[in-house]
Image: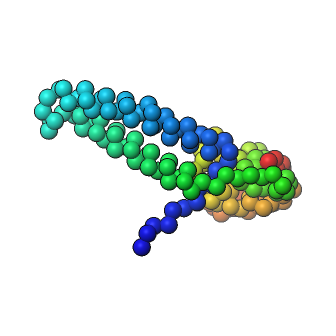
């Protein structure tokens, strides 16, 4: 039975970023790694050549990432929020929240899992917080169960 490929939900920016990464891997990184392999072959016996081993491992990683990106892009669904209710949280929305426990204000952008980057405040629509926020409006209270327990947020602002 053939494996069903998962749809990749992307913002227009996320699509552009993945296309750029794929292009870079195909045009620049492949050549760099091939050059490293060629150069390391000149060091002699391949059985005891750590440079060659490292270069082959890097080549496998690059080729694997290229395949992964090609599948993601082939199955990409770019989110177009034109016509979506601007006051409801959707993929592509930026949401400002208040943690009702700590009083801290947090801002997240809801993105597809391929674009999630917590360090950049981009959370996946599939994460517990992302899932809980989808479809909600400014002023609503959301309770989220996370590994640390329950967190309650008040939605202060929703921007598409």
Residue farthest bottom in this picture: 1
Examine the image and state in which quarter residue 38 appears. top left
**Residue 132 location in percent, x, y?**
71, 62
Give the residue displayed 30% in from the left and 29% down from the top.
36
**Residue 22 location in percent, x, y?**
50, 40
Give the residue displayed 37% in from the left and 29% down from the top.
32
Q: Is residue 141 left or right of residue 65?
A: right
**Residue 7 location in percent, x, y?**
58, 60
Question: In which quadrant is the N terminus drawn?
Answer: bottom left
Judge by depth and name the residue closer to the eye, 45 or 88: 45
Q: Is residue 114 left or right of residue 152?
A: left
Give the residue displayed 71% in from the left and 47% down from the top.
109
Is the residue 38 above or below the residue 142 in the image?
above
Colouring rule applied to residues? rainbow
Judge by depth and name the residue closer to the eye, 20 or 106: 20
**Residue 2 location in percent, x, y?**
43, 69
Count of numbered tags: 0
> Can residue 118 be seen in this snapshot?
no
Give the residue displayed 56% in from the left and 41% down from the top.
19
Q: Is residue 9 left or right of residue 155?
A: left
Q: Is residue 39 left or right of residue 44?
A: right
Is the residue 116 above or below the residue 131 in the image?
above
> Can residue 54 be seen in this snapshot?
yes
Examine the image and state in which quarter residue 144 appears. bottom right
Judge by depth and name the residue closer to the eye, 33 or 129: 33
Judge by depth and name the residue closer to the eye, 107 or 86: 86
């Amino acid at each position: 039975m053939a494996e069903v490929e998962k749809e990749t939900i992307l913002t227009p920016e996320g699509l552009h970023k993945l296309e750029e990464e794929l292009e870079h891997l195909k045009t620049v990184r492949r050549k760099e790694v091939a050059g490293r392999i060629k150069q390391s072959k000149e060091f002699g016996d391949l059985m005891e050549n750590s440079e060659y081993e490292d270069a082959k491992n890097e080549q496998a990683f690059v080729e694997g990432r290229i395949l992964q990106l090609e599948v993601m892009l082939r199955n990409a669904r770019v989110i177009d929020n034109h016509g979506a209710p601007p006051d409801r949280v959707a993929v592509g929305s930026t949401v400002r929240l208040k943690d009702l426990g700590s009083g801290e204000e947090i801002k997240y952008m809801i993105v597809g899992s391929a674009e999630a980057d917590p360090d950049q405040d981009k959370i996946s629509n599939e994460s517990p917080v992302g899932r809980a926020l989808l479809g909600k409006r400014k002023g609503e209270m959301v309770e989220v169960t996370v590994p640390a327990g329950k967190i309650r947020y008040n939605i202060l602002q929703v921007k598409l």
